[in-house]
Image (cartoon, grey):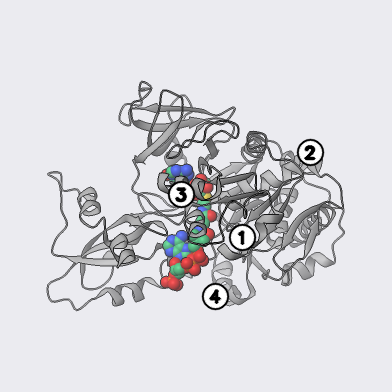
Amino acid sequence: MSNHLFDAIKRSVPSEEAIFIETGDAQYWTYGKMLEWSGKIAGAIDTLGVRPGDRVAVQVEKSAEALMLYLACIRCGAVYLPLNTAYTLAELDYFIGDAEPRLVVVSPKAEEGISTIASKYGALIETLDENGGGSLVELAKDEPADFTDSTRTPDDLAAILYTSGTTGRSKGAMLTHDNLLSNALSLRDYWGFTAQDRLIHALPIFHTHGLFVATNVILTSGASMFLLPKFDPAEVLSLMPRATTMMGVPTFYVRLLQNEGLNRNAVAGMRLFISGSAPLLADTHRAFHERTGQAILERYGMTETNMNTSNPYDGIRVAGTVGFPLPGVSVRVSDPETGMALAQGETGMIEVKGPNVFKGYWRMPEKTKSEFRDDGFFITGDLGKIDDQGYIHIVGRGKDLVISGGYNIYPKEVETEIDALPGIVESAVIGIPHPDFGEGVTAVVVKKPGSQTDEKTILNALNDRLARYKQPKQIIFVDDLPRNTMGKVQKNILREQYSLIYTARANA
Ligand code: MCA
Ligand code: AMP
């Protein structure tokens, strides 16, 4: 009897008394308490009737208890399905309908709205609040702490994470126990994590970065983390003297640089700053180095693949690159059309293969097949090259995707919503350089003649349909969209034409 991921976590526990989590209100979670509460919650889920392989969908605020719920699912064999807290009811309806979870866990304040959706798809509903209360915790209190973990092989599913699709429909990426464990162990060793590390954890816990990269690396190192509800530069700076490492999206570093408290002294005890989820501008890398003497380590991953490449821990971290393939991961660059491997230095499609790569998209075998080459390499949709030193550069995206503050937005999804509004002919959604979020979601819209629709009307209509971070930061009205001879909208022309709108606004 073994549970592939949780057995490895148990083997990494330094002692029952060692600290795993410190929350902002100076509450401590020891590793012993982690074992006890993940076991109790696993018991509660099991008593509710959740069986191995059943999905448990979770949309809750960040808390230590929420991480216990993730671990409880791993222990009882359920498939953990985290959902962004910004998702609207319309978005949740799709995810719950598609994944058909046995149980949905939500914040008490969202229970009323979501319960209709849960009952529509035959799911049970329980609550968990940001202070560690809620009906699920009440159930867990009556459960014994010594839960017998369910047997899970390396190939069994541990989680499904939804990523939006270029054609509109979101796809559930199926991640196995070994996808998560192999990547966590690899990152732990590559980045030199030990039980002495204390990570500043200010990321959300419903995406790969904050959930798997941060949490699983800490757990498999027997280390500890400061679990913060959100990113607040002043709070992060105040914790640095007691921390050793931080993981963040580029916006974290941009915002830290705006704080005068960031200097060599403030980071003296920090051994590593890691960035990922979106391109870190070389300027940000240089400015951070100048101010602190520390070179941010940039790495590259995807929901479907966990982490693929990383700049070296020992060695030169080159700004504007994502480093080398992680041990055990193969990366190649191919011709996007033919799939033929390209020579070193040439730009093409980045493809990856390794134990980190997901099992496929939930109930989408055709889609899964079309995104893999016959020899098992996954086609990332990212365009890049490998330089003569072996460093990988991401130079663009073959997929129509905007990344804003580390969140992905698929233009097609936003365009579909805008185009359905009265008075609209069509729209093109693009990402434009944004000083804070890296890229700002921008909609270029053509109205019907005589239509009174304005920016406010469109944004109000999107409020119930799309999570806030997906909504355009600006809407530009035009008479028509530029098209090529095939009739395809030329987004590159729009991106160029409006490239300065956010920087101009910031400098005004
Ligand atoms: C918040 N807003 C945003 C974003 N976040 N708008 C666009 N993009 C965003 N990322 C909206 C808010 O709803 C609000 O809207 C307004 O912007 C200002 O909010 P603010 O308070 O400034 O935002 P915040 O709460 O400080 O959040 C910014 C943030 C956050 C800290 C950058 O977005 C964040 O934590 N991002 C990390 C995302 C992440 O973990 N990605 C990893 C995905 P209004 O005022 O109009 O209401 S995993 C991944 O990508 C792969 C696998 C990988 O490689 O890691
Ligand atoms: P997600 O769908 O959230 O998993 O986002 C994955 C995408 O984020 C990748 O396919 C890349 O386009 C992008 N990404 C992640 N890390 C980096 C990075 N360090 N540099 C550039 N793009 C990145």
Q: Is residue 473 left or right of residue 116?
A: left
From what the image shows, is residue 161 above or below residue 181? Answer: below
Q: Is mark 3 on a helix, strand or loop?
A: helix
Q: Is mark 1 on a helix, strand or loop?
A: helix
- Whichever of labels 1 and 3 marks the residue nearer the N terminus, that label is 1
Q: How many labels does the image show?
A: 4
- Real-space Cα separation, disc 2 to disc 4, in angstroms: 39 Å
**Mark 1: which amino acid?**
Val
Q: Do the residues labelled 3 and 4 touch (CB within 8 Å)?
A: no
- Real-space Cα separation, disc 3 to disc 2, in angstroms: 48 Å
* Nearer to the camera, 234 or 340: 234
- Whichever of labels 2 and 1 marks the residue nearer the N terminus, that label is 2
Q: Can residue 297 be seen in this view?
A: yes
**Mark 3: which amino acid?**
Ala
Q: Are marks 1 and 4 in contact (CB under 8 Å)?
A: no
- Whichever of labels 2 and 4 marks the residue nearer the N terminus, that label is 2
* Nearer to the camera, 247 or 244: 244
* Residue neighbourhood size for the residue with mark 2, other residues' Cα within 10 Å, grouped as few (<14), some (14–19), many (≥20): few
Q: Which of marks 1 and 4 is in front?
A: 1
- Real-space Cα separation, disc 2 to disc 1, in angstroms: 38 Å
- Whichever of labels 3 and 2 marks the residue nearer the N terminus, that label is 2
- Real-space Cα separation, disc 1 to disc 3, in angstroms: 18 Å
Q: In this view, does 505 lie to the left or right of 493?
A: right
From what the image shows, is residue 464 above or below residue 265? Answer: below
- Which residue is the site of mark 4? 113
Q: Where is residue 379 in the image (x, y as percent from the top left)?
A: 42, 35
Q: In which quarter of the image is residue 238?
A: bottom right
Q: Where is residue 43 in the image (x, y as percent from the top left)?
A: 80, 58
- Which residue is the site of mark 3? 287
* Residue neighbourhood size for the residue with mark 3, other residues' Cα within 10 Å, grouped as few (<14), some (14–19), many (≥20): some
Q: Do the residues labelled 2 and 4 touch (CB within 8 Å)?
A: no
- Which residue is the site of mark 2? 2
